[in-house]
Image (cartoon, grey):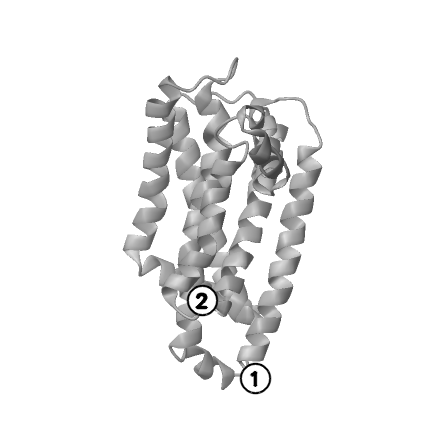
Amino acid sequence: MHDAWIMIKRSMLIVLRSPEAMAMAIITPFFLMVLFGTVFGNIADIGPYNYIDFIVPGIVLQSVAQGTQYTAVNVYNDMSKGIIDRFRSMPISKASVLTGHAAASIVRNTITTAVIIGTAFIVGFRPQGGFTDWLIAAGILTLFNIAISWMAILFGLLSKTPDGAIGFMFPFFILPFISSGFAPIETMPRWLRWFAEYQPMSPVIDATRNAMMDFPRDNSLWWALVWCIGITVFAFTCAVQVFKRRTV
């Protein structure tokens, strides 16, 4: 735990010393929320729903996925610039290095999420959920944040170049578009509807939206938990094994 705490502080310092990365983590979701909420919100028709209320979970997931690109690059930099060789000469836990990157990613993405929700209120977001509903929404988003952060760490370990690390994470930025994040799945072509319904982003988005808007609970909550926990276990296990193999 002591080793992990030291590595968490190190990773947070890396984030703070990259002001352009922090700026993008704040500015990009702000403009995404304004763009979709004001420009596209005036032309979108999703029935009885306010479009702002509908799209907030999708933009959160998309921005978090984009933010984890920096995590993948930071992990790649550690593996390629010799710092890991220095860590190997010290009596520290190997897993603490990865834990530090994961914690820094989670903190940065939490800030991004807060910016999106704050901006959403400015442009007309009016959630109906109570305190318990918001706890459920926060729990789901935190689990997704953890899962996507460990995926970024795994891809950073597997990448051969910084561009490769970013490229590995790009599909997670695209997936919210092919989900229930920006349009009801029922409006999609039949060949696309199946994929949108069963890919991991849709249940996470639906469960978060149901909690925020106090909609009736459905199976999306359980599927969101299954996806997030499953991805976390898979990514964490693979990342630790890859890291051990590369640092033997």
Q: Is residue 150 above or below residue 244?
A: above
Q: Position of residue 204 (x, y in %)?
A: 59, 38
Task: Identify which residue is drawn at 39% across, 21% down.
Answer: 41
Q: Position of residue 140 (x, y in %)?
A: 60, 40
Q: Is residue 214 above or below residue 221?
A: above
Q: Is residue 43 visible?
A: yes
Q: Amino acid at mark 2?
A: Val
Q: Amino acid at mark 1?
A: Val
Mark before the other along the chain sequence, 1 or 2: 2
- Assign the C terminus to one quadrant of the image: bottom right
Q: Is residue 212 above or below residue 200?
A: above
Q: State the mark number for residue 141.
A: none
Identify the element where label 1 is drawn: loop
Q: Tell me: 51 left or right of 189.
A: left
Asked whether 6 or 147 is in front, the reply is: 147
- Assign the N terminus to one quadrant of the image: bottom right
Which residue is the site of mark 2? 75
> Where, by quadrant of the figure, is residue 197 drawn?
top right
Task: Identify which residue is drawn at 62% across, 33% down.
Answer: 207
Query: Badge 1 local density, few (<14 within 10 Å), some, or many (20+)?
Result: few
Q: CA distance from mark 1 to mark 2?
A: 17 Å
Which residue is the site of mark 1? 248
Task: Identify which residue is drawn at 57% across, 72% down.
Answer: 242
Task: Identify which residue is drawn at 28% across, 54% down.
Answer: 20
Report the residue that reaches farthest toward the front.
191
Q: Tell me: 220 left or right of 26.
A: right
Q: Position of residue 187 (x, y in %)?
A: 54, 24
Q: Position of residue 81 (x, y in %)?
A: 37, 77
Q: Tell me: 51 left or right of 208.
A: left
Q: Tell me: 200 left or right of 105.
A: right
